[in-house]
Image (cartoon, rainbow, N blue to C red):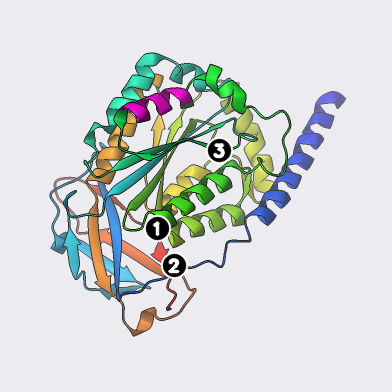
Amino acid sequence: MQKYKTKLIQLTLWLAFATTFISGQNRQAVEDVISIETDAVFIDALVRDKKTGKPVVDLKREDFTLKVDDKLREISEFSFDGKTNCPLTIILYFNFAPNGALRYLEQPKTQKSLSESLANLDENDEVAVISAHDWFVGKPQFLLKPNQNWELVAKSIADATNEAILDGQKPTKPDRLNQTTMTEAIAEVEKLTAERPGRAMALVYISDGVNTLDTMDFGSRRQLARRLVQNNISFSALNFSLLTGYSVAANVINPLAFAFGASVTGSANYLAKESGGVAVKIEKAEDFGSSLEGVIRVYSSRYSLGFYLDEIDQDEGKLHKIEVKIQPSKKKKLTVNVRRGFFLKRK
């Protein structure tokens, strides 16, 4: 019994260390803000049927209401057309425990279903692939930069889900550089955003069900969400439900983490909600492809809502809260996902 108590104390101390360390790692970029050179702001809205999760494609401008800082605003620009919306860059980010969902994704049929799920992308859209091999210490690496060669994309997806290839990514020792996998992945996508203006950016995180990302304290994950919003990066997640010891461990560890204001699960769902993305829970390995296809369909069916700034929007560095609602429908219940706000910096 004493042995288990000792292990519990060690685990608690480790969580406290991880929480303190990662909180410090994320502070440096908090003050960055978006530069807006025009008087117009555009918001992508992802609208789904609440019951089926499928995109809703028959809405009109008058079906939406938009508030900024709790003030009703006129939707002056409206479009729903993959041809007129800005092109989309999807970054697939694979992050698995070696003994987790990776064993299912190694199967060729699963890899094929993931590749085929990209068929709904527009000809101007593109895909990049990032992989980190292990929840806690895997350093994210680009296997493919944004590309429209679907054969290369398929090969990169296979590489990202092939344990034999990923063996070379396994770090021998956790260190200060590679202990913040999600922070580094978001930093890489921020660079892409700066390099590729005029494109919508969507980071799609594909992981095991125990959704650690970094072992984040609540303040740190709020800061990551702020970075996503500042750079107009939408974050979505496909979480595979592992009915194994991992799930049991999470139920034990998470209450301990909460005592330190941290979370080892649920962070991906939080980031998706804050940045206007979607989070999908996958129950069966064979559903990976169809689930990714569903997320891509939602992004391909996004609505673009535009409004003009006025005198209330002039506070630089402040998060201006955005709220979008849809008029009630008698036919079905709808859910709408948008980024939580925008930042302004006048040049």
Going from the N terminus, do you reach mark 1 or mark 3 first? 3
Going from the N terminus, do you reach mark 2 or mark 1 first? 2
Q: Whole-Å distance between the Cαs marked 1 and 3? A: 21 Å
- Please tell me the numbered disc located at residue 34: 2
- Please tell me the numbered disc located at residue 232: 1
Element under label 2? Answer: loop
Quadrant in the picture for residue 100: top right
Q: What residue type is labelled 2?
A: Ile
Magenta residues, as a range?
Answer: 151-159
Residue farthest bottom in this picture: 311
Residue 234 percent coordinates (x, y): 39, 51
**Residue 40 painted magenta:** no
Q: Is residue 225 left or right of residue 282?
A: right
Residue 198 percent coordinates (x, y): 31, 58
Taking depth in this image into account, of 1 and 287 the one nearest to the observer is: 287
Q: Whole-Å distance between the Cαs marked 2 and 1? A: 9 Å
Residue farthest right in this picture: 2
Decide: marks 2, 1 in contact (CB < 8 A)? yes
Quadrant in the picture for residue 222: bottom right
User: In the picture, which quadrant includes the N terminus?
Assistant: top right
Identity of the residue drawn at 56% across and 20% down = 244
Residue 264 percent coordinates (x, y): 60, 40
Residue 347 percent coordinates (x, y): 43, 78
Identity of the residue drawn at 21% across and 69% down = 75
Q: Is residue 170 left or right of residue 68?
A: right
Q: In this view, does 126 lie to the left or right of 262?
A: left
Residues packed near mark 1 inside 10 Å, few (<14), some (14 to 19) or many (20 plus): many
Q: Is residue 87 left or right of residue 159?
A: left
Instruction: Quickly name the residue at label 3.
Output: 140
Magenta segment, prevailing SS (helix, strand or loop): helix
Q: Work out whether residue 301 can be spotted.
A: yes
Q: What residue type is labelled 3?
A: Pro
